Image (cartoon, rainbow, N blue to C red):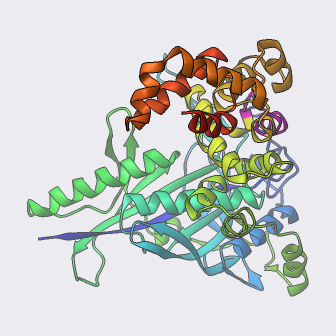
Amino acid sequence: MAFEPVIGLEVHAQLKTQTKIFCNCSTEFGKSPNANTCPVCTGMPGVLPVLNKQAVTFAIKAALATNCKIARESRFDRKNYFYPDLPKGYQISQYAAPIAEHGHLDIETPAGEKVIGITRIHMEEDAGKLVHDPHRAKSMVDLNRTGVPLIEIVSEPDIRSAEEAGAYLRKLHAILKYIDVCDGNMEQGSFRCDANISLRPVGQEEFGIRAELKNLNSFKNVEKAIRYEIERQTYVLEEGGQVIQETRLWDPNRNRTASMRGKEEAHDYRYFPDPDLVPLIVEKDWIQEVEKTMPELPDEKKARFVKDFQLSEYDAQVLTASIELATYFEETVKPLQNIKQAANWTMTTLMGMLNAKGLDITQSPVPAQAFSSLLLLLEKGSINANAAKTVFEEMAATGTPPEAIVKEKGLEQVSDQSELEGMVDEVISDNPDEAEAYRNGKTKLFSFFMGQIMKKTRGKADPKVVTPLLKSKL
């Protein structure tokens, strides 16, 4: 029997506010344990939460960017469970009345564009963190993260493969960074994902029993974990077994999922309205003010790159995949005419160097302005492509401006026609047999003559000048 995967994703995105969602404690990452705490976020008796307006504004921005309908009135609830890093014994979240619902994202798949529905976006506070002592049977609690504002973005179960899940997450990650509401740092947990996966016989409408994979914090791990879980559930069903509804964890070292606990349902959390917080009212004026601050989104920027820069859909897709790369590229091409050449150098030479060094575009040792200067030298014919690669490598290693490297290494391209004409005559004169063979039809020898001229000029001859001269002389 053939089975179809049904996948829904729950993404937790930390909002880039300076203070926590219900108190004035800092959200700065990396402070000493429990430094960013106060009586409110540590759940002391008698304290009252006060909602952070900036967090709400960021949630509205996220809702607008994902085509959601924003609720005029939403409410906060208490989600009750007991865990050492949850000081109040409950989490303030939104359950019955979230801030936004009924949105969607469009993703690219091998079969074309696909719409993935978004069920809801709700606001909540983060829990703390347990730090396990590797040398003793003890765990310590760090409450710095407690009360940090989150939005949870819940997709419809519209995803059918690990690849679609990866495409959806990358798109959502890019959007949240474009609108500057989340730093997207997956290693620090600012953007993390839970995946719900079930299988059903192909053609069946009813969903199968699902397993939830918790706290996946890289795109590759999400895809690997989903593939494994599909294989595991397929094996269970083909052997006549039944999938158990449970929460599982992904073990990246063993490349497998393992059972963590039975899956809780909503009633297990005993949700009820938080009596300390009044309903949140979002008037149209507030939404309109936020709309005025919305930047160009990835799809809009991609369309502009195709139209204004005459780039292919693929090139535009790559160059707008992150706001940082798109900004770097736009800064690079400001003084340039040959945009296609700049795109090729960005996607191959620059990104190849960054990947080899394990860096992202924000860590590039070659700033956009310096990269632009190099490409301008190439565009003007001051250096050729081989020399440009040599200059780029030196720039990446030392940070020296391209003009200085060209001058120091004597890499200026030879473009003077009379000078090159003399060299062409010399090369033909020194190789009479090859010249005769070329004239008798062995045209592949043209590259031999070009090589000889490049050897004479130490690679500095301008091919655009040499090629017609050589053809004429031969």
Query: What quarter of the picture does the C terminus occupy?
Result: top right
Quadrant of the rendered image containing residue 171:
bottom right
Q: Nearer the viewer, residue 242 or 353?
A: 353
Q: Nearer the viewer, residue 465 or 367?
A: 465
Whether residue 414 appears in this view of the structure is yes
- In-image side of 223 versus 43 (left or right): left
Q: Residue furthest left?
A: 239
The x, y position of residue 467, in whole percent, is: 61, 37
Range of residues picked out in magenta: 363-375
Query: What quarter of the picture does the N terminus occupy?
Result: bottom left
Residue drawn at 71 percent across, 18 percent down: 397
Residue drawn at 89 percent across, 74 percent down: 292
The x, y position of residue 330, in whole percent, is: 79, 52
Q: Nearer the viewer, residue 268 or 312?
A: 312
Main SS, magenta region, reads helix
Q: Is residue 329 above or below residue 465?
A: below
The x, y position of residue 155, in whole percent, is: 52, 71
Is 404 inside the magenta-drawn segment? no
- In-image side of 223 versus 315 (left or right): left
Q: Is residue 71 above or below residue 299?
A: below
Q: Is residue 45 above or below residue 68?
A: above
Residue drawn at 53 percent across, 23 percent down: 451
Quadrant of the rendered image containing residue 284:
bottom right
Q: Nearer the viewer, residue 135 or 313?
A: 313
Is 366 inside the magenta-drawn segment? yes
